[in-house]
Image: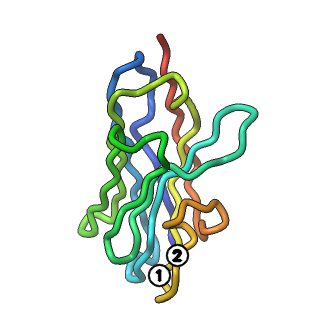
Amino acid sequence: QVQLAESGGGSVETGGTLTLSCEASGNTKKTYSMGWFRQAPGKAREGVAAVDCDGATNYVDAVKGRFTVSKDNAKNTLYLQMNSLQLDDTAMYYCAAETCHGGPSLLFTLLVAGGDYWGQGTQVTVSS
């Protein structure tokens, strides 16, 4: 089992920048695909960006060119660099992990069902 702890959320103005971090602890000897999801008030949770077991990255169209996801395996930490933040980016951001099993990763395709493990979330608020 793995525990995930997000940090780095906060309040920024439109056009601002934030970097989220997600530190994994516990059974980090296994490999995981990892990703970021977000949930705005009254809306369903949606996938934002993910890193697959082989290091490939995937982004939802709404954040392409603005967000960058990366993973530091030595530190067991996933990052999300968010630039040019917009009002619609306001949400609770969650980190998720899916155990690598050699087959297609649901989490990498940004499906909520792919998350085996979830963090508690970190709030991002963008204001004008």
Mark 1 and mark 2 residues within 8 Å of each other at the beta carbon:
yes
Percent position of residue 65, x then y: 33, 41
Q: Looking at the image, which residue is at 39% across and 57% down?
A: 23
Tell which residue pokes out farthest to the left in this image: 74
- Is the residue 102 above or below the residue 122 in the image? below
- Which residue has dot 2 on it? 105
For label 1, the SS is loop
- Circle 1 packing at 10 Å, graded few (<14), some (14-19), many (20+), is some
**Which label number is shown at residue 72?**
none
Q: Which of 81 and 10 is in front in this view?
A: 81
Q: How is the image coloured?
A: rainbow
| Tag in front: 1 or 2 | 2
Q: Mark 1 points at which residue?
A: 100
**In x, y percent, where is residue 86?**
46, 25
Percent across and percent down for residue 22 are 41, 53
In-front residue for pair 2/53: 53
Residue 45: x and y, percent? 66, 47
Residue at the (47%, 10%) spot, across then down: 128
Disc 2 crowd, CA 10 A, few/some/many (<14, 14-19, 20+)? many
Please, what is the three-letter code of the amino acid marked with disc 1?
Answer: Cys
Residue found 50% across the figure and 54% down from its top? 95
Q: For the point 36% across and 62% down, which residue is it?
A: 57
Indicate the quadrant containing the N terminus: top left, top right, bottom left or bottom right: bottom right
Q: Distance between the residues labelled 1 and 2?
A: 7 Å
Kindly identify the amino acid type of the residue bearing the numbered disc 2.
Ser
User: Is 91 in front, or is 4?
Assistant: 91
SS for callout 2: loop
As drawn, the residue found furthest toward the front would be 61
Of mark 1 and mark 2, the one earlier in the sequence is 1
Task: Tell whether 40 sits left or right of 99.
Answer: right
